[in-house]
Image (spheres, rainbow, N blue to C red):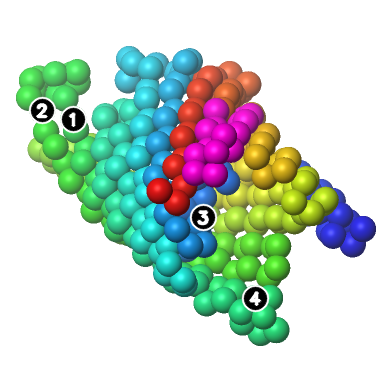
């Protein structure tokens, strides 16, 4: 009962948050290392993940339906983990590709044995491909602008409670061409809280979580993740102020593979869009 009461209090705190829009990947718990490089998603072993997100409906920013494709890996042994990704982000006005490589370390069993602390960092190289023939500047060529940057994160864990903070794009790299700034990777700040506890041991788990972000204002994401027998999950999250609702369903079809599919939409007219997302995760390959 005490654990259930704590979960309900956590949910009430989450519901009362408010925010401003920022571009996010839609399934936070599956993409948590994207926001905070200090977070391990495997304790010992490895995974290879394919993430894809496609916009069915979106404001006319670039005259195309944006597509995001991300291939990521993580190798963890003991208290150390190495991870990285290759990413194509069609959500930008120009096509943006990136390559990242990161490392984190966790100190386990601190205090009375229930506490742990982890630190992590990641180097990112952005490859921003600009096709000037699509712009009204009289230049018909193409240009690749390189934007290196850094992410840093911290996470504290006490039993089933996780509290993390991170800075993304610390350098906030920008690039100019002919005196015009075409690319800027905005600096962003994140704070997350996750309450991960079994309601019925190994049979039913409810995981409320909250993500705060800051970039020229504050936004937040509140979510609930339900898991049955560790083989099936359903997740709902809401982001404000653009009223971005997201539903994800995941199935563990074998000990080494998970499949997740998601549908998300914004009901606010100014930012109206509909997304589909798809994740395949190969574990301990």
- Front one among 39 and 183: 39
Q: Which residue sits at x=70%, y=62%?
A: 160
Q: Which residue is mark 3?
A: 41
What SS does tag 4 mark? Answer: strand
Above/below status of 115 relative to 7: below
Measure how far apart labels 3 and 1 are at the Cα level.
34 Å
Badge 1: how crowded within 10 Å, few (<14), some, or many (20+)?
some
Q: Which residue is mark 2?
A: 142
- Asked if the residue under mark 1 is in contact with the one under mark 2, i.e. CB atoms within 8 Å, the reply is yes
Please provide percent x and percent y for residue 45. Answer: 45, 58
The nearer-to-camera label among 3 and 1 is 3
Q: Earlier in the sequence, mark 4 or mark 1?
A: 4
The numbered dot on residue 122 is: none
Q: Which residue sits at x=45%, y=51%?
A: 284
Q: Is residue 275 visible?
A: yes
What SS does tag 1 mark? Answer: strand
Above/below status of 272 relative to 279: above
Measure how far apart labels 2 and 3 are at the Cα level.
39 Å
Measure how far apart labels 2 and 4 are at the Cα level.
52 Å
- Asked if the residue under mark 1 is in contact with the one under mark 4, i.e. CB atoms within 8 Å, the reply is no
Measure how far apart labels 4 and 1 are at the Cα level.
47 Å
Q: Which residue sits at x=77%, y=46%?
A: 203
Q: Which residue is mark 4?
A: 115
Please provide percent x and percent y for residue 5. Answer: 88, 56
What SS does tag 3 mark? Answer: loop
Q: Earlier in the sequence, mark 2 or mark 4?
A: 4
């Amino acid at each position: 009962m005490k654990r259930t009461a704590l979960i309900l209090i956590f949910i009430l705190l989450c519901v009362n948050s408010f925010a401003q829009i920022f571009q996010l990947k839609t399934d936070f718990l599956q993409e948590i290392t994207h926001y905070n490089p200090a977070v391990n998603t495997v304790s010992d072993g490895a995974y290879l993940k394919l993430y894809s997100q496609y916009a069915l409906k979106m404001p006319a920013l670039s005259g195309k339906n944006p597509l995001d494709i991300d291939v990521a890996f993580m190798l963890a042994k003991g208290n150390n983990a190495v991870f990285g990704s290759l990413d194509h982000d069609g959500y930008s006005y120009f096509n943006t590709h990136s390559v990242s490589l990161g490392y984190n370390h966790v100190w386990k069993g601190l205090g009375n044995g229930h506490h742990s602390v982890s630190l992590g960092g990641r180097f990112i190289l952005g490859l921003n491909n600009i096709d000037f023939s699509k712009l009204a500047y009289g230049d018909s060529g193409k240009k690749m602008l390189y934007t290196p940057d850094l992410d840093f994160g911290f996470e504290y864990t006490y039993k089933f409670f996780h509290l993390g903070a991170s800075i993304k794009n610390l350098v906030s790299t920008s690039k100019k061409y002919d005196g015009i700034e075409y690319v800027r990777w905005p600096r962003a700040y994140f704070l997350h809280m996750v309450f991960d506890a079994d309601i019925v041991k190994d049979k039913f788990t409810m995981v409320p979580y909250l993500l705060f972000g800051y970039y020229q204002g504050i936004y937040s994401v509140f979510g609930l993740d339900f898991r049955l027998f560790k083989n099936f999950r359903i997740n709902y999250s809401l982001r404000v102020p653009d009223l971005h609702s997201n539903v994800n369903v995941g199935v563990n079809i074998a000990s080494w593979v998970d499949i997740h599919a998601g549908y998300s939409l914004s009901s606010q007219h100014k930012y109206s869009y509909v997304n589909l997302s798809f994740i395949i995760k190969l574990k301990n390959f």
